[in-house]
Image (spheres, rainbow, N blue to C red):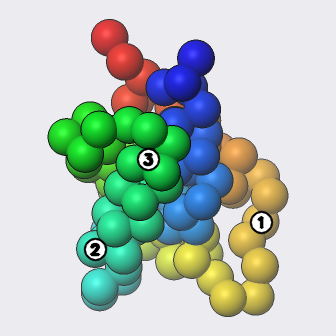
Amino acid sequence: MRVQSLLAACAASVLLLPLAATAGNFPAGKEAAYMTQCQQVATGQGVDAATAKKHCDCGAQAIKKNFTDKEIQDLDSTDGVDAKLMAKAQSVVQAACKPK
């Protein structure tokens, strides 16, 4: 249960997640910001640092694999993030990074 909460929190708190049919990449400097924020959220929820890093790495790879450059950029938008895009991002990260 705690891992599900971690996955949802990381996906929701990090507005750098997107979904599409082709692979994309984070804008310059944004992947490092995603990793830092994701790990802070995870460790704040009582997850050890190694597990948090592993989950956040998985999330970043899932985002790159499933979203276009534009969608990734839109997830970090300063004028608001599309709720459907965010929901898709959360789903993708949860599916790709759920504990085995």
Q: Element at badge 3?
A: helix
The residue type indicated by label 2 comes to Ala
Point out which mark residue 42 bears: 3
Which residue is located at x 44 percent, y 38 percent? 46
The quarter in which the N terminus is drawn is top right
**Which quadrant of the structure image shows residue 13?**
bottom right
The residue type indicated by label 3 comes to Ala
Residue at the disc numbered 1: 82
**Image coords of residue 29 (percent x, y):** 29, 85
**Image coords of residue 62 (percent x, y):** 37, 44
Name the N-terminal-most of marks 2 and 1: 2
The 10 Å Cα crowd at callout 3, few under 14, some 14 to 19, many 20 or more, is: many
**Image coords of residue 92 (percent x, y):** 52, 37
**Which quadrant of the structure image shows residue 37?**
bottom left
Q: CA distance from mark 2 to mark 1?
A: 22 Å
Which residue is located at x 32 percent, y 11 percent? 100
Q: CA distance from mark 2 to mark 3?
A: 15 Å
The 10 Å Cα crowd at callout 2, few under 14, some 14 to 19, many 20 or more, is: few
The residue type indicated by label 1 comes to Asp
Nearer to me, 66 or 26: 26
| 95, above or below 53, in the image | above
Point out which mark residue 32 bears: 2
The mark tally for this picture is 3
Residue projecting furthest to the left: 50
Tell me: 49 left or right of 63: left
The nearer-to-camera label among 1 and 3 is 3
Q: CA distance from mark 1 to mark 3?
A: 24 Å
| 8, above or below 97, in the image | below
Residue 63 seen in this snapshot: no
Point out which mark residue 4 bears: none
Name the N-terminal-most of marks 2 and 3: 2
The nearer-to-camera label among 2 and 1 is 2
